[in-house]
Image (cartoon, rainbow, N blue to C red):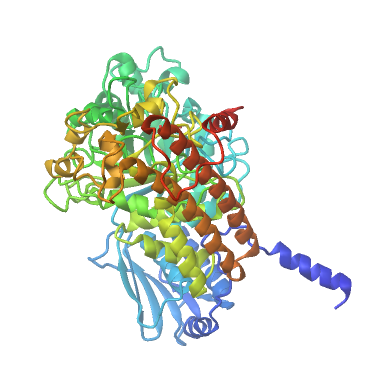
Amino acid sequence: MQPIALLFALLCFEAKADDGYRLWLKYDPLQDASKRASYSKSINSVYASQESSTISAAVEELQMGLKGLLGKNITLVKSMDSKRGNIVLKIENNEKLSEEGYRIFSQNGNFYISSKSEKGLLYGSYEFLRQVQTLQDLSKINIESNPKIKLRLLNHWDNPNGTIERGYAGASLWKWHELPYVIDPRYKDYARANASIGINGTVLNNVNASARFMTAEYLEKVEALAKVFRPYQIKVFLSVRFSAPRNVGGLPTADPLDPQVRQWWKDKAKEIYSIIPDFGGFVVKANSEGEPGPQDYNRTHVDGANMLAEALEPFNGIVMWRAFVYKADPNGDRTKEAYYEFKPFDGQFHKNVIVQVKNGPLDFQPREPFHPLFGAMPQTPLMMEFQLTQEYLGFATHLVYEAPMFKEVLDADTYAKGKGSTVAKVIDGSLHNYRFSAICGVANTGSDRNWTGHPIGQVNWYTLGRLAWDYSLSSEQIAEEWIKMTLTTQPKAVATIKDMMLKSREVMVNYMTPLGLHHLMGEGIHYGPQPWLDKSGRPDWTSTYYHRADTIGLGFNRSATGSNAVGLYAPEIQAVWGSEENCPLEFLLWFHHVRWDKKLPTGKSLWDELCFRYYGGAEEVKKMQEQWIPIKPFIDKEIFTDVLGRLQIQHREAVWWRDACVLYFQTFSKKPIPEPLEKPKTTLEELKKLVLIYQMR
Ligand code: BDP
């Protein structure tokens, strides 16, 4: 080869390096040659018994995916090819399937994807591709699958100016200033990615909402996105600003009992549906963290939610009313407030209202007990809000696989109707026979080429969809699927990456907030340690409010002798969490103020255990770095280097967390760091300055 040609070839090769854009829909040729040959032999064409834009999307994906994976053109045939090897998309009645469910099976040398509706055909097609991507045996394939939760949503905290609240992967995906005229091809890829994991709705804008989204100008833009998402069965929703009738409607009030206000929302709903006929509905953050709401007019959450619900009802829209509310009370306990505010309203919400509850009673911490509202509102559909974006989990620089955290909450038992009344059964509607079921994740996507900043952050988006569809999937299975589809199918590399991912959340808990500690993050930014923070805009935004360290011990007493937040849970739970002796160590300091010298079941004193956890967490990150290095030959170079760099930052910062917390809590415990742990190389004073630098504008 001529040198110039060689250089060109090299450049082309370089250009092909994986930038992560294709997510888990990568469709590179399968590395396993024998599997590839066997799939190629058994798949020739695709045949669809009906036509629709959704079915076309499914066919297009199957053709594109299989072409990439198998290196073979899969033709769309107008009648079943007698040569066999057809993938047949077929609408048929099957009483075991819900509207979105599907069945995949093989018969007489053909593969069938069947469903009651085009929706199931779409989801089944992605499942078929997943089977190939993860090298499953197709010869006897027989899968029947129905989603466990009806509405499976992403919540984008995106602002009209392109910024994202708590977004760490670039700017907003939505280019509002270009819409509706310019349609970024990325919108379609976003829809494909979501459909592939069963996500069927997206809330486009921040819960701290701009009233601008209620203007005709913005509704046209929203419709432009809805149009792209429609074939992929993704409905759009908007967060609304409660004061919109005043802000953009020219009314003097937004009082939900004012007839003019009520009419304004009715007219607005009519206008929205005339532009976006399949619009999903509203999300509302009201009277929370300074946002406007019905209480501004001495009305209640029910008054506000029901007004909007009545406006949307004729069009089958729904209202997702958030329960994330808390008053600034230095003597109170923030973790109890939403319960007190909402529980009395059980049964009073209009039939198309669903109350959206964060997984824990505080705010997306690395570990929280489940929210006490789950199980406590049998007559009001409750939905789950998880946070995919890593606001309190080290942004996009720390590797944290969130599935174990989500599953811990979903699997938790509320005992609302006796043993086995899990949070999952509350939110899938089965426990209380709710009219709706829904789950959402605050998106971690942005304009970064790889969508999520951290290449492994993609898995958290993937996880939300997979768990929303079927929360009985294990963290392990979800990790394995994602790794094989996204990074590598080489067995040793898969096992190593999976191991890193599965432990990552616990590792983070250990170096940030072990033993039930919470909210020790830097003020406002929520990054880096600031356990000494004792003054802020509100008392419950400080760290000292939460950890309550003193010379006697550490932790927030939420037992019956303290705030009694534990009293909001079922008696079976109170008996465990409410007793310092029985409380599992992961929630110990969440519920109890424990003496420094208290001997724990591990055999260590609280102080020693705390130190060992902080040091152990930081040490584990170092091990993760060491584990990552040998997998280099098996994954893309660009992704390898990117993750390695992030692991280096994560290790530095895990040490930062460790040192800051241990040195600070030591000023109360007055005890030495136990042997053989090495003393931090920095001083507390130096560390205090560091977080301030992070907070500088
Ligand atoms: C907090 C975030 C804040 C959000 C709020 C919410 O710090 O930016 O607006 O949650 O969920 O965690 O409304």
Q: Is residue 494 above or below residue 294?
A: below
Q: Who's the residue at 51% across and 61% down the image?
A: 24
Q: Is residue 49 above or below residue 299?
A: below
Residue reaching furthest to the top = 252
Q: Which corner quadrant holds the C terminus? A: top right
The count of marks equals: 0
Q: Which corner quadrant holds the N terminus? A: bottom right
- In this picture, residue 228 sits left or right of residue 354: right
Residue 542 in the image: state x and y as whole percent.
Answer: 41, 26
Comparing 359 with 497, the one in front is: 497
Comparing 155 with 459, the one in front is: 459
Residue 400 in the image: state x and y as whole percent.
Answer: 46, 51
Q: Is residue 178 above or below residue 117?
A: above
Residue 235 at least partly seen: no
Residue 8 in the image: state x and y as whole percent.
Answer: 81, 68
Comparing 375 with 219, the one in front is: 375
Residue 473 at least partly seen: yes
Q: Who's the residue at 54% across and 44% down the image?
A: 653
- Write down the quadrant of residue 243 in the picture: top left
- In this picture, residue 507 sits left or right of residue 421: right
Q: Who's the residue at 50% across and 43% down the image?
A: 679
Q: Is residue 675 above or below residue 628?
A: above
Specify the quarter for ligand 1. top left
Residue 298 in the image: state x and y as whole percent.
Answer: 28, 15
Comparing 552 with 628, the one in front is: 552
- Write down the quadrant of residue 279 in the picture: top left
